[in-house]
Image (spheres, coloured by chain):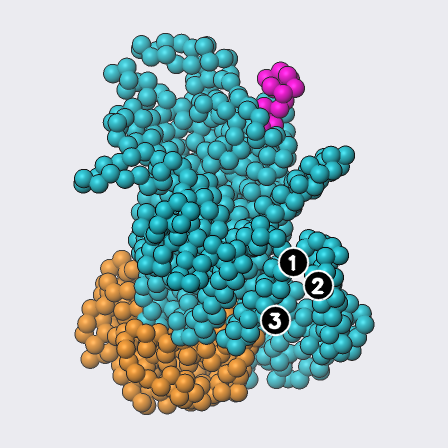
Amino acid sequence: MTTFLTFTILGLVLGSVYAIAASGLVLTYNTSGIFNFAHGAQAMLGTFLYWQLSVGWGLPVWLSLLLVVGVFGPLMGLLLHKLIMGALRDTAEVAKIVVTVAVMLGMVYLSQWIWDPVEPRTLTMFFGSDASVEIAGVVVRLHEILCLAVALAIALGLRMLFHRTRVGVVMRGTVDSPDLLRLNGHDPARVAAISWALGSALAVLAGILITPVSGGSLEANALTLLVIDAFAAAMFGRLRNIPPAFVGAMVLGLLGAYVTAYFPSDWTWTGNFRVSLPMILLFIVIVVLPQDRLRGAATRTRERYRVPSVRAAATWGLVLLGIVFLYSLLLADSGITTLGLGMAFAIIALSLTLLTGYAGEMNLAPMSFAAIATVIVFHFGITGSGLDASLNLPGIALAVVATAVVGGLVALPALRLRGLYLALATLAFGALLSNMVLRDTVEHTLAGFTFTLFPDGTLIIPKPRFGPVDLGDPLTFLLVATALFALIALGLAVLRNSGYGRRLAAMKDSPAATAMLGQNLVKLKLSVFMLSAAIAGLGGILMSSAMGSVEGESFGLMASLALVMLVVVGGIGYISGALFGGVMSGIGFTLLVGTFNDLAISQPQAATFFELLGNVVMVGTALVGMGVGKNPSGSVQGIMDGYRSLREARPVLIGGAALVAVLYALALAGLYGSWTFTLLALVVVMALPAVGQKLMPHAVAPVEGHGHSDEIRDDEPFTDTLRDRLDLALGLPARVPGVRAAAPQKGEEVNAPA
Amino acid sequence: MPLLETQGVTVRFGGNTAVNQVSIGAEEGRITGLIGPNGAGKTTLFNTVTGLQKPTEGRVLIDGVDITGMSPAKRAKLGLARTFQQLELFLSLSVRDNVKVAGDILRATTRKRIDLDAETDRILELTGLTDIAGRDVSDIPTGRARVVEVARALMTSPRVLLLDEPASGQTEQETEAFAELLTGLAADGLAICLVEHDLPLVMKLCATIHVLDYGSIIASGSPREVQESPEVIAAYIGTEEVA
């Protein structure tokens, strides 16, 4: 009985913190329609700041609390609202998701920059961990009572806000009909800003309260993910209603406590199951929730993607192979290995081009599929041992096929879902996989077999060898990986131009219309999900063998989210976007940050400067991600478009190519290193369109826009026909019915479109 | 017997009854009109017939087969096709591919061997879209975009075609050509159900007209009968509003 009571109280305490976090999330989603993936990161950042003030600088607890929860939290919310909201009008769900994901990553990088992760930090309970009272034989700490009291106060406070105050009532109306609010003289943006401030303060409060309860040590990733657990609670109220979210939070807290209390401790899965519980619950709640009706594209989005022609894809593939080969001549073996790793990541990124770019479905956990294939190939695909070990083709094929099947099985319950819900379901799956498989280092016995999924937390993955082709050689590996990328990209171009590709595009643009043409959407989604999982799996195997040894963290949620963000920044609808995103997330970080750290070591007098640069790169990338709203179609294609306009300006193109060739020759001759060449070449490539504009303004054709090219243009006189058309387009019935043949007149006023 | 039939269809959203005990039909080779003021429940009825909305009560039948519980895709296989009042074109595809993709779906889901390109060209020709076949569908005027939706629906070789305000946004000439197209299609045996606010067009084309008001059928009959119905006159005058 005491056990039961102890764990019930523990569960309720955890539940109240989840409830605080979840209510903040619901608040922001309700008023702005944006699901804030950065909610956990905000909590984390606030908690770190609180630590800095109260422990680091020794300020009184009350003052630190006031400054962090009362000032910093709301300010952070207001700032985010300002940064995010304006940029996200008329963008697809993908951009909306990626922007807050970028904020989240940026905050995590920022905190690791300010607070060195190597140094341990702890946060103790309020009133100390000894301050407690005994209730019915159970010791309850004052901190725990405080959590319960705060949650209760917030529940009552929010209820008052929504039902008794003007602002609260307006908040409730914001999401349903912002236009109506505007007509009534309210400002939806102001209301949204207030709720972001409030939601952000609640996140910070939740972070400060939960840290001591869950061990007390402050760690950026862990704390961010801890608050993400509150997503499940928010989902109980369909992200809309706070009371069910409170119930969900309590269910979540209690279940977790009871699993700890009553699950057999000798059962080898218990520990990981306990940690995964919130994500399992999130997945279940999303899947069983009644879904919205099948919808079409309600809003026109700004994203537009050109369809790649098969010939162009083939040509670009060969060009890429050539460039990579030439570039590899400048690199040392270690550099070639790193570039090979980048290519492997680019292949994983191609899975997103297919799934999100072509089919419009979301997957926030691409690295999880990479992990599945890696685990399978580790168990079944290695020939030989020690230094002679290699991956064999049947093993790789098995892993890829099995990943596709697992991908399909996972996606199956979630396939009715769309947009945000599907994204959250994949997020839950990714977290679940991280906890249950990638941390599965203990031995299990099942039906007579003894096995460990992820032995010792590290898998040694050798390089593949196919007959005479040994990928153990770095250059061979790089070229094979590049060729594979080019081949898959070519395959995607073929696919996009096929009937299957058109069906995917149709489903992405209007699911309702596609279903009405006889397409079973679940089948189509399932097929594209499996195909995408297979590609991610293949890339994952290459990635793991390029790294040589992988840990669970290599496939973690943060890695997945960073990849998704970078691919969207590069352009999710384009193969070039996958190349950019993959190479950037595969090697960009490691290489850039590594280079700066090397420089810092070699030049101690400028060490701080180079370390600063390394950190700026990390945070800067996230800032670029936040800019996705401004250019939702992606940045790489923007550069390509610049070149499209240079087609006629041959001398500029030839001059540019010659310049790069000279730079390359000089680098080959050893005049400067590969990094200098890379920077110089990039500058030339980026600057060329602008230079062309200056040098040969007449030869540079204007880029074809995607604006309105209706027959009505502002440079021709308005004829009657044109005016009629304008009237019709604007829904003005004035002239049209009168002109038409005589007929019954009643009801003509109804002629305007609804 | 009508090819498409609703039997006592009722749709309630919370306490609101959007469609109330509607039993109407559409016959082969005929154009059936469905008119009524804004918010009368026309689109909701279409959504119910095509499976995008579950009815609270009642049944929907095609050729005597109860399709009430079927998915939209299955209904399409039985020969049901529709257009949307709020355009649902595939914005990343060209005009031609918007039509062609319907054939892609047909080929992938029924193993029907059709010459896709020839059939697409035939439909584009029939609907008068050949001149803009290569254009981005987001770049064409609304009136023609509505025809693209019709062409796309025709590509599935439907038996019943539901048109939701197909003429809104069309110029006079476009509407004339469109009327001709519909007459031709009906002559070939297609059952067409037309929701339209352009009353002259409805009166010209339809053999039977149903008038929907506040979710209920208030009159059914020939154009003349409907025009003379006192309920219809009351409904329209009663709901006169500034556009």
Chain letter of the residue beneath label 2 in the structure image? A
- Is any atom of residue A390 visible in this view? yes
Q: Quadrant of the N terminus of chain B?
A: bottom left
Residue A262 vs A740, above or below: the answer is above
Question: Residue B181: which numbered mark, if any?
Answer: none
Q: Are marks 1 and 2 in contact (CB under 8 Å)?
A: yes
- The residue depicted at 42 percent of the width and 75 percent of the height is A498
Q: Quadrant of residue B112?
A: bottom left
| Residue occupied by mark 3 | A706
Magenta stretch prevailing secondary structure: helix
Secondary element at tag 3: loop
The residue pinned by badge 1 equals: A330
Return the chain for callout 3: A
Q: Amino acid at mark 1?
A: Leu
Subunit ID for the residue under disc 1: A
Q: Amino acid at mark 3?
A: His
Disc number for residue A664:
2
Relative height, residue A671 to residue A66 (above, below) = below
Q: Which residues are magenta?
A: A48-63
Q: Where is residue A520 drawn, in percent x and y?
A: 32, 66
